[in-house]
Image (spheres, helix red, strand yellow):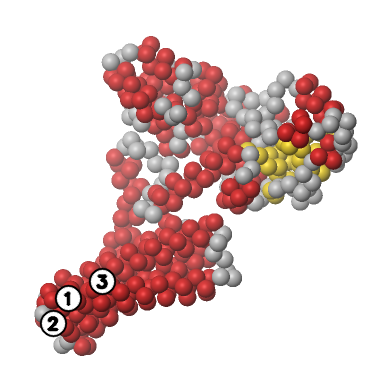
Amino acid sequence: MHQTTPQITNIVELLNVNDSAAVAALFASAHPADIADALEQLTPANRPLAWVHVPIAVKGEVLTELSEGVFKNLAHELDNRELVNAIKALDIDELADLIPDLPEALLADVLFEVDTKTRANLGEVLSYPEDSAGGLMNLDTTAVRDNISLDVVLHYLRLKSELPEHTDTIYLVDRQNRLSGILPVDRLITKPGQDSALAHAIETPVTFQCLDDEEDVAKAFADYNLISAPVVDQNNALLGRITIDDVVDVIRDQAEHDIMAAAGLKEDEDIFAPVAKTSRNRTVWLAVNLVTALLGSWVIGLFEGSIQQIVALAVLMPIVASMGGNAGTQTLTVVIRGMSVGTISRGNMLTVLKKETMVGVLNGLIWAIVIAFVSTLWFEDIFLGLVIAAAMIANLVMGAIAGVCIPIFLDKMKIDPALAGGVALTTVTDVVGYFSVLGLATVLLL
């Protein structure tokens, strides 16, 4: 059971009363991920005080669990020598994850300290894009020739002092290091020892090319219930492997990105970052929102005379804009998710558009009847009710169409739909909502 929250609470209290021994005792029995959680929920001033009590053996792992913002803050406060000692003992894939966030001076020290083999392996991993299968892979694999028996494989494994983490399969390769198949450990243990290893191998396993996108890797792990999978080059030569712990990080990072991007925020932002820095990071997005709000206000200004003559329009038009925005957001969310998991493609986009448009029409008719009835009773004007109803239908249909088209357009423009889709959609539904209400009222009621 996860016990992070009580520990965090205790550590905050213990730091406040300077009970260093108790903090050290809590950290001594805590998992590195729990220690990282504790550090993230401390203020920047308290993090270095707590860091000194982190056991030396797990300091590197704790660093890999920190968010980018907190890691950079802590790295700025700590001594380079201590950080180098913590980082250099990490696995290649963990080192590769940290390197983009390291200050240049610290990076130089780390590369100087690691051995030649580690430096070469690190260079190979870093040669691939960070968000690719090559960037995720670990070079620490267990591979044997494909022409030996199960007994020989077992003997080889016993000679090794330990196996890499998450070793659920043994990779079988030929003399050119090309992958012939993968041997699940359960088959290795349960099948007759004199049998050929290749006879019990999975000859067509799930494999990844080094440039495959990390989101495709994560989807495959989820679809096929993988614990690990090999990474190969264009000639099917074994390069390394990806393990489930790295994929979980990808899934978590993507989820955090989607949540934060919807508000125009960075997922790695430190909650305790300085006020000036946080304000600066958010200003750009607020400026974009101001521009879109001014566009909506400009549309309202075009019909200022209509509003002065029929004050009820000022009361009712925000309802139309809000309903269109909510309906569009539902469609937008479904489409962005479909694009991310691959259920929406170029071949079925038109079908999705037709379906969502019909949903917009149906919902528009339902809520148009409701708003027409309410408006007529409220302002005792049936024609006003009909205008608002027509505007409701128009905006809900437009919200559905925009919810499909905007993320597709943004994706083609190489813009993250999760980041910009919400603002673009709100602009469309506000403008269409205001214009339809005020335009119809100007034509039909004045």
- Indicate which label's residue lies in the foreground, 1 or 3: 1
| Quadrant in the picture for the C terminus | bottom left
Tag 1 residue: 375
Quadrant for residue 163, please give it: top right
Pick whichever of labels 1 and 3 is earlier in the sequence: 3
Circle 3 residues within 10 Å: few <14, some 14–19, many ≥20: many
Mark-to-mark CA distance, 3 and 2? 17 Å
Tag 2 residue: 381
The amino acid marked with disc number 1 is Ser
Pick whichever of labels 3 and 2 is earlier in the sequence: 3
Residue 373 as seen in the image, left or right of residue 94: left
Numbered circle sitting on residue 119: none
Q: Is residue 25 above or below residue 356?
A: above
Q: 301 and 104: which one is in front?
A: 301
Quadrant for residue 300, please give it: bottom left
The residue shown at (46%, 16%) is 28
The amino acid marked with disc number 2 is Asp
Q: Residue furthest top?
A: 21
Q: Position of residue 286 (x, y in %)?
A: 31, 55
CB under 8 Å between discs 1 and 2: yes
Q: 88 and 238: which one is in front?
A: 238
